[in-house]
Image (cartoon, grey):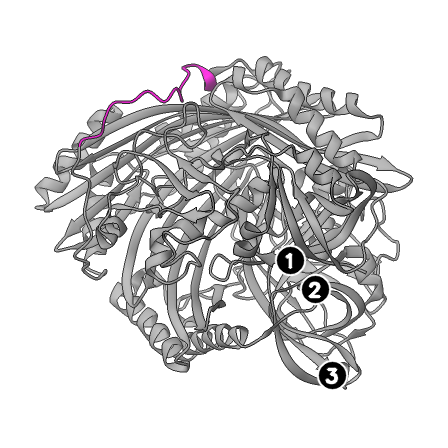
């Protein structure tokens, strides 16, 4: 087997390769991860997966042109080929005076995002977590009679970044998660309910809660029928609200704003949402699923209030877009992996808890739709803000469920939706992807149906 | 970048023997080298140029009902054997030892032509295509405010070997040129999108094709800023063949994947031989359709791709299978065990899926509708396979009045239930149009194409604005 360098030495070798090629400024990003997952079926283990990943991405900035290449071949030849490719790529792109690599040292901060051994749990512990999900789901209701897929997974990874300009940082993180799709049956009708949760360590994950919630989601849809086409107030529980919040995230990207692709362009200081709405992006939330000390460019992460009581306060930026806007970089140039370039994205994005008793707000409504699942969320257009989605829900009268509904659509515009929030619960919950939200009550959305 | 030799028959055999050294009945090596190039022109500037190579392998061992899979980046044969050892250590209660037979390599027919390997084309030529598309899209209309053009090149070399002696290779050359335009009028911003994608060489990206894609994207963005919001309600809908096949992919295709049917969870479970659609409907999945985005010589388990008739004149014939589910369901392997990369186990997936053309004249289908909606282009979709409920996005549509196209509409979605919709379709045209995309399932992406003729749906829910 060829000699293996440590992660530190690999990064050093890549930096010295860049210098030996005469590259003016360059950056090396390394990810070294291992993970495991277990899928169960009929009470027994169906598959066990062990995964390893170790590779680098190199960025070269020469004459204000940026080139990027990545490789999983970490021998001397592979690193050199990658550095050369990054440089060749820099010749293709156009110069931009605002391009820059990180220059500020990264501060030392403990975000409580790592527990050693999370990805080295014995197989029987992992399997037990997955089995606990299904046991809890079955215990909810005898009509829960199967599962589409139930998995438990965990991982540990090291992320390193170093530049020829002397910036260097690294952090470790761990993760574990469980998810299932429970199937409920009644009189030939079948309904599915999905739920997944994750944490930074096993003690933060409650598999039984995952199973219970998936089962409840499946059972509550049984007997669903269409609704007439109409306008109705809509209730989004925290999990459904997070789904829509994920679609709102790109509106805050400075890149989208600068390129006129965001409805929030030129709106700083203006009212863009109901005054009940405060939205925060916290890159350093302790134990947050998207917390990290620095972003994909080696810039320290920050906490930003993006919308404060309905008023837009600012955007999420990278080094380049911050320079164009003449503001400080927020540390939101996020990198999906060693092979992905940085893209501006939210970290732990959440709607701050409100003071409303969500149940009381709903009881005060003559009629409402409480959404229980949304189909086609990936088609929400971040440019126009328009959405038109498949939905299931519970039709409510004065807060009491009349019947479940399916085969319907909900449609609107993200900015109209933010303005139409008439209730914000105190029940803030954080979910997968670092997103968080309390229950939101929307005064009115278009429901398409029979 | 330097090119390492792929896995030799000797290395594969060594890895398979190692994988089975602590028990297990069957083992497989999946090795992959994936070279990519991505170029993005945005805001009139070439912003991203990214080249990369990812090389790795996954070793699978099955023991009774259990599968053990170890995967990771591998640089050489030693890494591969080490990975096989890791898989073997994961096999608990492996039972009696089984021997891996010596590999017997064979060549499969290729269904894609690669006259020009994109890796041999200068990057400047590719950048030239991006600029051309950008210029054409911007020149179409003053309301076009922003254009993003991306070029994606993917060359995936695959080796599959298993303990039954199979040893097969495939090279998938896939290209993608996508244009996204944003138009603005007053306060309204709208997008338009068009892409050219296929499993073929650089020759597919002719100047004419690239310009046409750019015009389509820009025209759609401009059309949508001037369009009325779609009215929510139940309508008669004509889906043009130009709309592409998202409908068949979402409403039927996923429900015919064998894994869900083995679990008895699909709306089509246990219904082979039964009528599940209007007799006008024949559904085919064809991984051999030349040069299409979902085409390959074999799936990611080494099974040759095939043309599979799933529904024939309304009657369910079979499911889309991988090795495991074909065996369990007692159906023929269809060559649909696909994986995103060496990091994943294969799962049952579509390749190129279509509703076969019928007998109706497309023009007559349109003129048969007094009041309805004409869908000219579909976007993304999603299905809940257990209930059969699906939703898909419409990116270009018009009102039909008295059998003729009237005003354009924007922001519409179609929702329905797969089997119900398929039993209600009452006209199927003689034409056929394709669309392409990346299908997501269980966290894995797969390149696919879908196709359909012009069809009429008498009554379906259209999502949009009320009042």
In the picture, the disc for residue B466 is 2
In the picture, the disc for residue A411 is 1
Q: Secondary structure at mark 1?
A: strand
Q: Determine the CA span between mark 2 and mark 3.
A: 20 Å
Q: Secondary structure at mark 2?
A: loop
When asked about the image quadrant of residue A151, the answer is: top right
Q: Nearer the viewer, residue A56 or A340?
A: A340
Taking the view exactly as shown, the residue that stands out farthest to the right is A187
Q: Which residues, given as a range, are shown in magenta?
A: A105-119
Circle 3 sits on which residue? Answer: B401
**Disc 2 packing (10 Å; few <14; some 14–19; many ≥20):** some
- Could one spot residue A297 in this view of the protein? yes
Image coords of residue A174 (percent x, y): 43, 23
Q: Nearer the viewer, residue A307 or A102?
A: A307
Where is B23 relative to A364, above or below?
above
Image coords of residue A372 (percent x, y): 70, 41
Q: Determine the CA span between mark 1 and mark 2.
A: 9 Å
Chain of the residue under label 3: B
- The quarter of the image holding the N terminus of chain A is top left
Image coords of residue B276 (percent x, y): 85, 57
- The quarter of the image holding the C terminus of chain A is bottom right
Q: Determine the CA span between mark 3 and mark 1.
A: 24 Å
State which mark lies toward you, 2 or 3: 2
Q: Which residue shows up at 41% across the image and 38% down it?
A: A281
Chain of the residue under label 1: A
């Amino acid at each position: 087997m060829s000699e293996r360098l440590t992660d530190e030495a690999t990064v050093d070798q890549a930096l010295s390769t860049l210098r030996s090629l005469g590259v003016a400024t360059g950056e090396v990003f390394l990810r070294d991860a291992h993970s495991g997952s277990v899928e169960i079926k009929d009470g027994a283990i169906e598959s066990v997966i062990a995964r390893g990943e170790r590779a680098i991405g190199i960025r070269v900035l020469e004459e204000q042109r940026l080139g990027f290449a990545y490789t999983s071949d970490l021998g001397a030849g592979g690193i050199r080929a990658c550095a050369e490719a990054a440089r060749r790529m820099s010749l293709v792109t156009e110069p931009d005076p605002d391009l820059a690599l990180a220059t500020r040292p990264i501060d030392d901060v403990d975000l409580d995002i790592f527990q050693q051994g999370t990805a080295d749990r014995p197989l029987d512990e992992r399997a037990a977590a997955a089995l606990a999900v299904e046991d809890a789901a079955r215990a909810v209701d005898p009509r829960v009679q199967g599962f589409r897929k139930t998995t438990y997974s965990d991982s540990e990874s090291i992320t390193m970044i170093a530049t020829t300009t002397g910036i260097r940082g690294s952090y470790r993180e761990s993760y574990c998660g469980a998810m299932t799709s429970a199937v409920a049956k009644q009189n030939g009708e079948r309904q599915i309910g999905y739920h997944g949760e994750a944490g930074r360590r096993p003690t933060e994950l409650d598999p039984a809660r995952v199973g219970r919630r998936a089962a409840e989601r499946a059972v509550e849809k049984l007997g669903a029928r269409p609704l007439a086409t109409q306008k109705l107030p809509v209730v989004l529980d925290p999990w459904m609200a997070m789904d829509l919040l994920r679609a709102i995230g790109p509106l805050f990207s400075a890149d989208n704003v600068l390129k006129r692709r965001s409805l929030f362009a030129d709106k700083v200081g203006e009212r863009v949402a109901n005054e009940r709405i405060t939205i925060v992006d916290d890159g350093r939330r302790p134990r947050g699923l998207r917390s990290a000390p620095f972003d994909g460019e080696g810039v320290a992460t920050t906490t930003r209030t993006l919308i404060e009581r309905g008023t837009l306060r600012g955007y999420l930026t990278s080094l380049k877009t911050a320079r164009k806007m003449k503001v400080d970089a927020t540390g939101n140039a996020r990198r999906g992996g060693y092979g992905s370039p940085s893209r501006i994205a939210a970290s732990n994005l959440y709607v701050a808890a409100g003071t409303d008793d969500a149940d009381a707000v709903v009881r005060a409504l003559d009629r409402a739709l409480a959404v229980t699942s949304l189909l086609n969320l990936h088609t929400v257009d971040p440019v126009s803000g328009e959405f038109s989605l498949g939905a299931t829900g519970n039709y409510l009268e004065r807060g009491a469920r009349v019947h479940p509904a399916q085969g319907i659509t909900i449609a609107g515009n993200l900015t109209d939706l933010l303005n139409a929030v008439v209730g914000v619960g105190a029940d803030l919950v954080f979910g997968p992807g670092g997103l968080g939200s309390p229950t939101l009550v929307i005064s009115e959305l278009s429901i398409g149906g029979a | 970048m330097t090119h390492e030799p792929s896995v030799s028959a000797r290395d594969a055999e060594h890895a398979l023997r190692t994988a089975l050294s602590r028990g297990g009945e069957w083992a497989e090596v999946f090795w992959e080298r994936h070279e990519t190039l991505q170029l993005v022109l945005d805001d009139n500037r070439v912003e991203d140029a990214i080249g990369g190579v990812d090389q790795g392998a996954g070793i699978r061992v099955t023991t009774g009902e259990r599968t053990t899979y170890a995967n990771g980046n591998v640089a050489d044969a030693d890494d591969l054997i080490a990975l096989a050892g890791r898989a073997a250590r994961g096999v608990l209660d492996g039972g009696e030892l089984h021997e891996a037979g010596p590999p017997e390599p064979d060549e499969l027919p290729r269904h894609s032509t690669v006259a020009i390997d994109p890796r041999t084309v200068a990057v400047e030529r590719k950048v030239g295509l991006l600029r051309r598309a950008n210029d054409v899209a911007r020149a179409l209309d003053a309301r076009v405010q922003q254009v993003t053009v991306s070029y994606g090149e993917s060359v995936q070399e695959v080796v599959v070997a298993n303990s039954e002696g199979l040893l097969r290779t495939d090279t998938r050359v896939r290209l993608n040129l996508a244009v996204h335009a944003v138009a603005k009028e007053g306060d309204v911003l709208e997008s338009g999108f068009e892409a050219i994608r296929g499993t073929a060489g650089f020759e597919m990206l002719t100047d004419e094709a690239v310009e046409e894609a750019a015009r389509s994207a820009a025209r759609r963005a401009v059309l949508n800023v001037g369009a009325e919001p779609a009215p929510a309600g139940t309508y008669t809908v004509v889906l043009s063949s130009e709309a592409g096949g998202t409908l068949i992919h979402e409403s039927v295709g996923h429900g015919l994947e064998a894994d869900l049917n083995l679990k008895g969870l699909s709306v089509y479970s246990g219904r082979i031989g039964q009528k599940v659609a209007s007799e006008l409907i024949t559904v085919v999945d064809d991984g051999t359709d030349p040069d299409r985005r979902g085409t390959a010589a074999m799936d990611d388990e080494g099974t040759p791709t095939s043309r599979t008739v799933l529904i024939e004149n309304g009657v369910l014939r079979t499911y889309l299978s991988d090795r495991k589910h074909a065996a369990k369901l007692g159906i023929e392997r269809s060559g649909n065990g696909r994986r995103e990369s060496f990091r994943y186990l294969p799962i049952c997936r579509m390749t190129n899926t279509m509703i076969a053309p019928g007998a109706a004249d497309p023009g007559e289908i349109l003129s048969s509708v007094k009041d309805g909606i004409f869908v000219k282009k579909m976007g993304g979709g999603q299905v809940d396979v257990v209930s059969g409920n699906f939703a898909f996005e419409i990116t270009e549509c018009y009102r039909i009045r008295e059998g003729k196209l009237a005003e354009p509409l924007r922001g519409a979605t179609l929702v329905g239930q797969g089997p119900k919709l398929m039993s209600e379709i009452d006209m199927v045209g003689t034409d056929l149009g394709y669309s392409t995309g990346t299908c997501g399932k269980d966290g894995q992406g797969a390149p696919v194409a879908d196709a359909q003729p012009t069809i009429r749906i008498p009554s379906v829910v259209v999502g949009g604005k009320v009042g």
